Image (cartoon, helix red, strand yellow):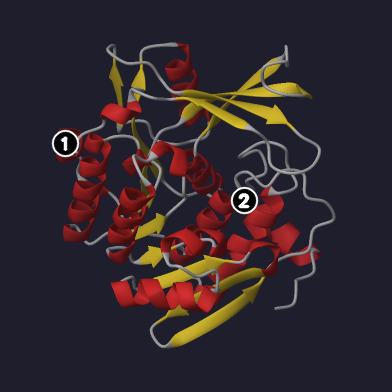
Amino acid sequence: MGKGLMLAGEPMGMLIAQDEGSLDSVTGYSLAVAGAEFNVATGSARLGHKTAYLTKLGDDPFGKLIARTLRNNGIEDKLVMYTKERTTGFMLKNKVSKGDPEIFYFRKGSAASTLSPEDIEKIDFSEYSNVHMTGILPALSDSTRAAVRLMFKKAREAGLFISFDPNLRPQLWPSQEVMVKTLNELAAQADLVLPGNGEGDILCGTTDASEINKFYRNLGAKMVVTKVGPKGAVCSIEDREIKVPGFIIDKVVDTVGAGDGFACGVITGLMEGLSVEKAVERGCAIGAIQCTFPGDNEGLPTPDKLQAFMDSHKRTSF
């Protein structure tokens, strides 16, 4: 299984509306923790993998909530740093019965946005076998961009397997040009790139999964798995292209976190020595399970629940 998975990102406090309606009219919210990398970390830990999370939190209630939630989920917090100078980011999410929920961020100038190359220098990368990153952390500031570049360099030097999910957040970047250039530079250095076909339109100029895979393989990525929604995913490695069908579910409750569940499935599958096809199949299963739950990470399964789902659900056809 390897030495374990390290992730880096910005976990945030999340206030989820208890009733439907616009965010400025809802009066009741429940509290949770959100963040793409946090979702992947939670899924990895639930599947029994040693998992560590690198971030910076404020000395405030949201920071304390996140630290406690990491520990409660079995995620190592020894790479968590704290600052009294900045606060922890948080977000509002409304409740919807169909379509995607409205999200509003309070993260500008957050504690995590001050992560810097100096913070990365302190990490012993040899303690881990894998590192997973998304395109969110480098979007936060010049210093986080520099920190992520150094992480890729040090992970490569230490021989870690690097996975990268572009996870587009255009509103966080100074411009689309900087976003596309930075994310494609990072993807070129990864062992595994996990785009969605919708993201391919912006990053590669096409929504065709085979063409997206070809684009990133030509840039230097060793393996590319492009998600094509409920249909499944298309994987390219060496001179092979593999189409892996998804799983049919009765009802989609909330798609938020499905891509993170997918990433978790593929990464942990490869860490466990599964074939590429079986690892991507696991990714499709966890992504589908997550769509049946209202929160960002509540549906992430234990090994038994994952197997039960895969045994009991039919596949889509490609």
> Mark 1 and mark 2 in contact (Cβ < 8 Å)?
no
Badge number at residue 89: none
For mark 2, does the 10 Å Cα neighbourhood hold few (<14), some (14 to 19), or many (20 or more) residues? many
Residue 53 % position (x, y) = 37, 38
Residue at the (26%, 48%) spot, across then down? 127
Amino acid type at image mark 1: Lys
Look at mark 1 in the image and give the residue it sits on. 122
Q: Quick one: 93 or 205, which is closer to the camera?
A: 205
Residue ID at (33%, 23%): 111
Image location (x, y in percent) of residue 146: 20, 43
Within 10 angstroms of label 1, few (less than 14), some, or many (20 or more) residues? few
**Residue 122, quarter of picture:** top left
In the image, what residue occupies the spot 80% across and 69% down? 314
Which residue is the site of mark 2?
258
Residue 309 lies, in percent from the top left, at 74, 58
Q: Pick whichever, 265 or 185, lies toward us.
A: 185
Q: Is residue 3 visible?
A: no
Task: Return the residue found at the far bottom.
Answer: 239
Which residue is at the front of the view, 317 or 82?
317
- Eyeballing the image, is 247 above or below 17? below
Q: Work out how far the residue at label 2 is from the one at label 1, CA to CA, in angstroms.
A: 32 Å
Which kind of residue does numbered mark 2 sit on?
Ala
Dot 2 or dot 1, earlier in sequence: 1
Tell me if residue 93 can be seen.
yes
